[in-house]
């Protein structure tokens, strides 16, 4: 049996409000926030005593979602170094198509976004960059050139 769709990408954060503000500024829409706990949460995650705050955001087209999770218990663990380079095994990044890359980066800077390198031009097709957002999350941005 084949999968039906990719439902969402999950990212564990420490500062939920800052992470939500960053992705809302990027253009995502907050669907809602809730808390989960109990036997189903424990069973699903393989952890004991889960109490987790969840925020679900969706892209404007409604096709993609991002689930942010803040663990109240058990306490989330942090890997070091915190701001790992892009080529570390298991490092995740989320890529978004944007209509104006320069403007998007400018809007995200007050929310802590830092370019990992520079804005790059791929042939006559795309402008591309990676920014580091809250919690060290690497976010890819791509503007299609017309």
Image: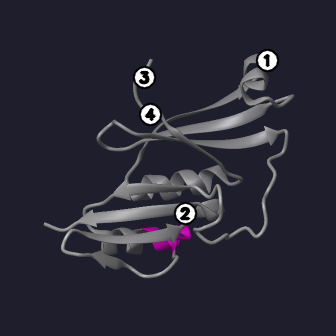
- In the image, residue 3 lies at what x, y percent? 44, 25
Name the residue tied to disc 1: 39
Q: Which mark is residue 2?
A: 3
SS category of the residue bearing label 3: loop
Q: Earlier in the sequence, mark 2 or mark 1?
A: 1
Q: Please provide the residue range marked out in magenta.
A: 108-114
Q: Earlier in the sequence, mark 4 or mark 2?
A: 4
Q: Residue at x 27, y 65 (%)?
A: 143
Find the residue positioned furthest to the bottom: 118
Q: Residue at x 40, y 24 (%)?
A: 4
Q: Residue at x 44, y 52 (%)?
A: 24
Compared across the picture, whether 11 is left or right of 100 comes to: right
- In the image, residue 71 lies at what x, y percent? 75, 41
Relative to 71, say whether 138 is above or below. below
Q: Is residue 25 magenta?
A: no
Q: Of the residues tagged 4 and 3, which is closer to the observer? A: 3
Real-space Cα separation, disc 2 to disc 1, in angstroms: 32 Å
SS category of the residue bearing label 1: helix
Q: Which mark is residue 6?
A: 4
Real-space Cα separation, disc 1 to disc 4, in angstroms: 25 Å
Name the residue tied to disc 2: 138
Q: Of the residues tagged 2 and 3, which is closer to the observer? A: 3
Real-space Cα separation, disc 4 to disc 3, in angstroms: 11 Å
- In the image, residue 141 lies at what x, y percent? 38, 64
10 Å neighbourhood of mark 2: few (<14), some, or many (≥20)? many
SS category of the residue bearing label 2: strand
Picture quadrant where residue 65 is located? top left
Considering depth in this image, is 84 or 38 the residue closer to the camera? 84
Q: Of the residues tagged 1 and 3, which is closer to the observer? A: 3
Q: Earlier in the sequence, mark 2 or mark 3?
A: 3
Compared across the picture, whether 14 is left or right of 139 comes to: right
Picture quadrant where residue 39 is located? top right
């Amino acid at each position: 049996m084949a999968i039906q769709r990719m439902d969402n990408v999950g990212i564990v954060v420490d500062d939920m409000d800052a992470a939500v503000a960053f992705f809302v500024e990027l253009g995502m829409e907050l669907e809602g926030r809730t808390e989960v706990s109990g036997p189903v949460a424990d069973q699903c995650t393989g952890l004991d005593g889960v109490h987790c705050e969840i925020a679900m955001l969706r892209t404007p087209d409604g096709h993609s979602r991002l689930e942010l999770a803040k663990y109240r218990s058990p306490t989330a663990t942090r890997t070091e170094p915190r701001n790992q380079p892009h080529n570390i095994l298991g490092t995740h990044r989320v890529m978004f198509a944007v209509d104006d890359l320069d403007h998007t980066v400018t809007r995200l800077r007050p929310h802590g976004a830092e370019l990992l390198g520079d804005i790059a031009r791929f042939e006559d097709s795309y402008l591309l960059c990676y920014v580091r957002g809250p919690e060290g999350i690497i976010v890819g941005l791509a503007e299609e050139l017309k």
